[in-house]
Image (tube, grey):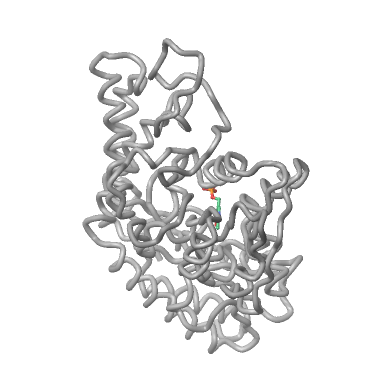
């Protein structure tokens, strides 16, 4: 019951936790991420402001991370990747930067609050929102999304994989249909970036937002918004970019158009290292590993009496977050007992997605969510399952 020190030698050799909360933030990070952050911190000039050596080095840290994002997502022009402090900031920029009063938006009933709350705010500004209900397994049908398109529809916002049920949504079909109708699309890839292949040269999505600290295995304080060329978007924040300083108007070229104020070059240095690790390993390989662990989890959970698992039964149709409930027990109680008894760290509750839980019928108590990551071992999954069996049936422990 400890993390393998192979990956993160900076961690104490024995850490008495089994970390199964990678959907919230990934842990551990690949070797070198923490070191790169510490190193950058010691020599950080202001990226893109001054012209001296340390400023240029920090600007390079951002540039390298941006180039690796572009490589990972199959995009030639890295300037279309705008750094944000997390997926929430990126989603807010996309939603509030594209929509205008009178516009109509189509979204799903399994979105995270980082989509629903900005959309509800935009409703107050005269935007109309259609929420398309998902089925019981958390999957939204593409035909229902497409049927909700109207003349005034300007944007479709869709999560790639639900952070509650893990259910993958039919983004390919919806994006293709929206494109044919001239409707912009925004995909929330917070749960899939880095763990499911996404190729922006094949998927004609207009905007894609993700965190840097989840599947991309980077430090907290990182995230990005991809904006395809030609998509009209107004910056939420304007100010110093270090470019066109002679003008009191925001530059229109990317990434500066959407990057005002000092960027987080220190954490970008760490993100560049985690992205290099992912590029070396390959997202397809990471995905295979996570599917195998998800299979193990689904099989193991199905064998424990009184445990109900939510989301698609087939691991090929889901990300690696698995939600479940134990009959007669509050999810928060299960989460607490897993930690106290066995050092297993999971997330219980509503996961910032009340609508996702309404769709599954698990509102308001929520579920217990287990989410393995690329460094999770089969043994850790086995320990979690045995801890849960003991909670369910203390005589078996
Ligand atoms: C589907 C989804 N969207 C958005 C977010 C927000 O991500 P962040 O915490 O990086 O802002 C999360 C985080 O849990 C998520 O799961």
Q: Is residue 11 above or below residue 379?
A: above
The image shows residue 59 at horizontal and vertical percentages of: 30, 27
> What residue is shown at x 75% (from left), y 47% (from top)?
123
Looking at the picture, tell me which residue is in the foreground, 217 or 196.
196
Q: How many marks?
A: 0
Q: Is residue 224 left or right of residue 115?
A: left
> What residue is shown at x 31% (from left), y 47% (from top)?
70
Looking at the picture, tell me which residue is in the foreground, 393 or 98.
98
Q: Quadrant of the N terminus?
A: bottom left
Question: Visible in this render: residue 223?
Answer: no
Q: Is residue 323 above or below residue 19?
A: below
Looking at the picture, tell me which residue is in the foreground, 10 or 108.
108
The image shows residue 172 at horizontal and vertical percentages of: 46, 68
Q: Is residue 321 left or right of residue 288?
A: right
The image shows residue 294 at horizontal and vertical percentages of: 44, 76
Q: Quadrant of the C terminus?
A: bottom right
Image quadrant in which you'd find residue 111: bottom right
Residue that protrudes farthest toward the top in the picture: 246
> What residue is shown at x 61% (from left), y 68% (from top)?
145
Looking at the picture, tell me which residue is in the foreground, 306 or 266.
266
The image shows residue 345 at horizontal and vertical percentages of: 52, 61
Q: Is residue 358 above or below residue 27?
A: below
Question: Visible in this render: residue 209?
Answer: yes
> What residue is shown at x 31% (from left), y 24% (from top)?
42
């Amino acid at each position: 019951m400890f993390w393998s020190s192979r990956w993160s030698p900076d961690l104490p050799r024995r850490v008495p936790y089994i970390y199964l909360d990678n959907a919230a933030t990934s842990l551990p990070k690949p070797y070198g991420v923490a070191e790169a952050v510490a190193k950058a911190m010691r020599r950080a000039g202001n990226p893109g402001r001054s012209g001296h050596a340390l400023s240029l080095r920090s600007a390079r840290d951002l540039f390298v991370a941006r180039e690796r994002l572009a490589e990972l997502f199959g995009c030639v022009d890295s300037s279309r990747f705008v750094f944000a402090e997390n997926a929430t900031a990126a989603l807010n920029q996309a939603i509030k930067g594209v929509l205008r009063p009178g516009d109509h938006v189509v979204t799903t009933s399994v979105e995270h609050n980082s989509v629903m709350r900005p959309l509800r705010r935009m409703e107050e500004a005269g935007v109309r929102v259609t929420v398309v209900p998902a089925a019981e397994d958390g999957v939204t049908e593409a035909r229902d999304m497409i049927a909700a398109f109207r003349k005034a529809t300007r944007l479709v916002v869709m999560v790639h994989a639900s952070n509650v049920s893990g259910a993958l949504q039919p983004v390919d079909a919806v994006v293709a249909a929206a494109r044919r109708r001239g409707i912009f699309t925004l995909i929330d890839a917070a749960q899939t970036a880095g763990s499911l292949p996404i190729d922006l040269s094949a998927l004609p999505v207009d905007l894609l937002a993700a965190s840097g600290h989840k599947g991309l295995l980077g430090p907290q304080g990182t995230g990005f918004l991809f904006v395809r060329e030609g998509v009209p978007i107004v910056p939420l924040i304007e100010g110093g970019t270090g470019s066109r300083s002679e003008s009191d108007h925001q530059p229109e070229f990317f990434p500066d158009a959407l990057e005002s104020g000092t960027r987080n070059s220190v954490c970008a240095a760490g993100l560049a290292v985690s992205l290099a690790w992912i590029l070396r390993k390959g997202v397809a390989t990471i995905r295979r590993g996570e599917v195998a662990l998800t299979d193990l989890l689904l099989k193991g959970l199905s064998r424990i009496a009184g445990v109900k698992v939510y989301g698609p039964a087939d691991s090929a149709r889901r990300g690696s977050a698995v939600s479940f409930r134990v009959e007669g027990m509050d999810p928060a109680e299960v989460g607490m007992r897993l930690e106290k008894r066995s050092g297993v760290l999971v997330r219980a509750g509503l996961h910032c997605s009340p609508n996702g839980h309404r769709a599954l019928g698990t509102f308001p108590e929520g579920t217990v969510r287990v989410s393995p990551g690329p460094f999770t071992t089969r043994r850790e999954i086995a320990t979690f399952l045995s801890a849960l069996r003991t909670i369910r049936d203390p005589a078996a422990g």
